Image (tube, coloured by chain):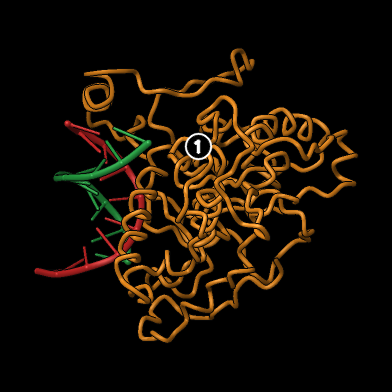
Chain colours: A orange, B green, C red
Amino acid sequence: MGEEVKMRECEANGDEERVALWEIGLPAADDLTPLSQPLVPPELASAFSISPEPHRTILEVNRASQNTVSNIRGAGGGGLLNALSSNNFKSYNEDRARDSMVVEPEPEPEENNMDPDGSGSESRKLRKIDSGEADSALRAENFGDDPSARTLKRPRLVWTPQLHKRFVDVVGYLGIKSAVPKTIMQLMNVEGLTRENVASHLQKYRLYLKRMQGLSSEGPSSSDQLFASTPVPQSLHENGSGAGGGGSGGSGSAHGNGHLGMPIPGPYHPAAGPMVPMPVYGHMGMQMGNHHHHHGFDGNISYNMLQQRDWSGNNYGSVVSYPHHPQHVTPPNDNM
DNA sequence: GGTATAATAT
DNA sequence: AATATTATAC
């Protein structure tokens, strides 16, 4: 991924520059298809004693990746890898500090489930306390109106073209039938991504598909910039051969994917690193002219790259900028 | 898990 | 103010 986008030297007030810049920042369809899984080089794999079995299904690989990740980290291979689970967001600011440019998307609303010694580490996922008072009441009463504590809420997830591409790939891979939020979320393997996030997006995506079917050869309207950027797999038109396992269990190797040349599956090589959404507060985390060496192997994709969506608004001039603008400024992650 | 609706961002 | 996007409630 060498030439992602051309930097534009627009200033903060370059609003009038309403040219067709949007498509500049939009990677080609081929370009943003790192979704294919063969992302882990053989040599690397062998270096870590990883035996990539082709038989495995995505879910299994994903699951196993958690362990693998640990191994890799231990080996000191790349600091980029986070010891994250499929879907928990607690180990956020652990290695964000230094060479790892991964930052947690957002502060977690829940209690600080610090796990100092790692007891009960892995398969733990945060869950809302249950019914009734729990969630709303807790937030309302417990936290009341004291901003100092942790009244912070997760920033809205921004579905970048890359993220959406991943989403579409997974959905296409699963087939309509199996494409349910939970499974999609798991296969996407994006840190911080919740089932709700996916469900919401899936809803919109379905509406889009429906809308598209209704119209005969009508190109996507201007409203569908995101969806328009990603071709919809024909797999979606058919039924997915049920993924047996469905959710967490097993998993059928049967993919609704009827594609012959397109082996989507690639929910990314989970083993090497899940996609890590990285909200960049303030302006930019890194400048183009300042890249450090980046081998082709970029296990993790960060929001830095994911945020490149100029078509969304008028944030020209900066490579990345957080959709909204929290109250913080650029994180001190300038050491690389 | 799916849909309706609220909240928020642009 | 309107609309698009995401979150949350049901």
Q: Which residue is labeled 1 in the image?
A: A183
A327 vs A144: above or below? below
Residue in the picture at 69% in, 33% down: A65
x and y percentages locating residue A44 in the rendered image? 86, 44
Give the quarter of the image for residue A78: top right
Q: Amino acid at mark 1?
A: Thr
Figure quadrant of the C terminus of chain A: bottom right
Figure quadrant of the N terminus of chain A: bottom right
x and y percentages locating residue A177 in the rendered image? 45, 42
Residue A263 left/right relative to A243: right
A323 vs A18: above or below? above
Residue in the picture at 68% in, 72% down: A289
Residue in the picture at 34% in, 49% down: A203
Q: Does dot 1 land on a helix, a strand or a loop?
A: helix
Q: Chain of mark 1?
A: A
x and y percentages locating residue A88 in the rendered image? 52, 30
Q: Nearer the viewer, residue A248 or A334?
A: A248
Q: How many numbered marks have been drawn onto this rendered protein structure?
A: 1
Residue in the picture at 48% in, 20% down: A113
Q: Nearer the viewer, residue A142 or A41?
A: A41
Residue A125 left/right relative to A260: left
Residue B8 left/right relative to A69: left
Q: Nearer the viewer, residue A67 or B2?
A: B2
x and y percentages locating residue A264 in the rendered image? 63, 53
Q: Residues within 10 Å of mark 1 (few under 14, many from 20)?
A: many
